[in-house]
Image (spheres, rainbow, N blue to C red):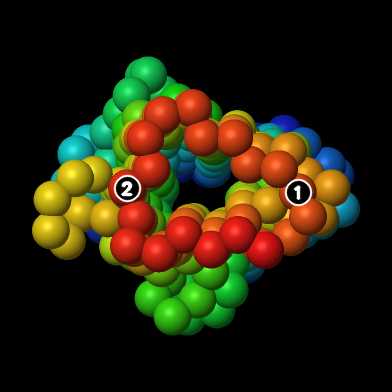
Amino acid sequence: IRYNDNGIVNLADGKNINSSVTTDAPNQGTLNLTGTSTVSGQVGDATNNLKEINANGIAGKTVTFANDVYATNTNIGAGTVDIKGNLTGTVNSTSPGVGTLTTTGIIDQIITGTVGNIGNLNVSNTGHSTIVAGNVNAVNTKIDSTLIMTDGSNVTSTITGAGNLTLNGSSTVTGTVGASGTGNSLANVKSGANSSNSTFVNDVYANTVENTGTGNTTFQDNVVATNVNVN
């Protein structure tokens, strides 16, 4: 599929795209997906990205992108967008607090852009990491693998799961990290990169909490951990 102008492609529920989606100019073209679909090829590129992707499915519907996605805005309805490659662009909810973005690739994945006020961000690329270069404002963030926040990227979200959270620079995390009770803590929470200043506003529950470099980490509430390592 190739956009030669700012046109619109509507894909019906249950239908798939088994090719790349390209456009001959930046911020051009809209792809609407109304239900469960798989897009096998790359969508846009670093030079010529789509204007919008609208995953408008109801709850229980999933749009799967098997490759990299480049779009100015990816808008999620009540359903789920499953990304198996990298995502470049802003992620929005069509209604505040709904919709799910899940990373399930068998690679280390990168989200470049803000994850807006969706309901859920699920970091589920088991054995790999998801790097977010932008703020995360999802209501809930569940980490099953490793979430890495780049320098200057902040998290405003309740974080759960059994995975790892790493701050690679200066970040503020607003929202409880992990939870009390057996099996509810994160495995590892790591911060303190050289010359950084990071803040955890709410309680942190993790098996291991580490300050790994020469940076400063401020915990404004309780830290419940089996191991606390300070470099």
Residue 164 in percent (x, y) is at 44, 63
Q: Judge left or right: residue 107 versus residue 133.
A: left
Residue 40 in percent (x, y) is at 49, 71
- Quarter of the rendering occupied by the C terminus: bottom right
Above or below — where is 176 with respect to 211?
Answer: above
Nearer the observer, 217 or 61: 217
Q: Judge left or right: residue 66 versus residue 13.
A: right
Q: Which residue is mark 2?
A: 224
What residue appears at the point 53 percent right and 63 percent down from the top-left corner? 229
Residue 105 in percent (x, y) is at 47, 73
Q: Judge left or right: residue 167 versus residue 23.
A: left
Any part of residue 215 in sight:
yes
Above or below — where is 74 with respect to 41?
Answer: above
Q: CA distance from mark 2 to mark 1?
A: 21 Å
The amino acid at mark 2 is: Val
Residue 148: which numbered mark, if any? Answer: none
Q: Which residue is mark 1?
A: 215
The amino acid at mark 1 is: Gly
Q: Residues within 10 Å of mark 1 (few under 14, many from 20)?
A: some
What residue appears at the point 32 percent right and 62 percent down from the top-left corner? 226
Above or below — where is 231 with respect to 170?
Answer: below
SS at badge 1: loop
Above or below — where is 149 with respect to 93?
Answer: below
Any part of residue 83 in sight:
no
Ranked by sequence position, the earlier of labels 2 and 1 is: 1
Q: Residues within 10 Å of mark 2 (few under 14, many from 20)?
A: some
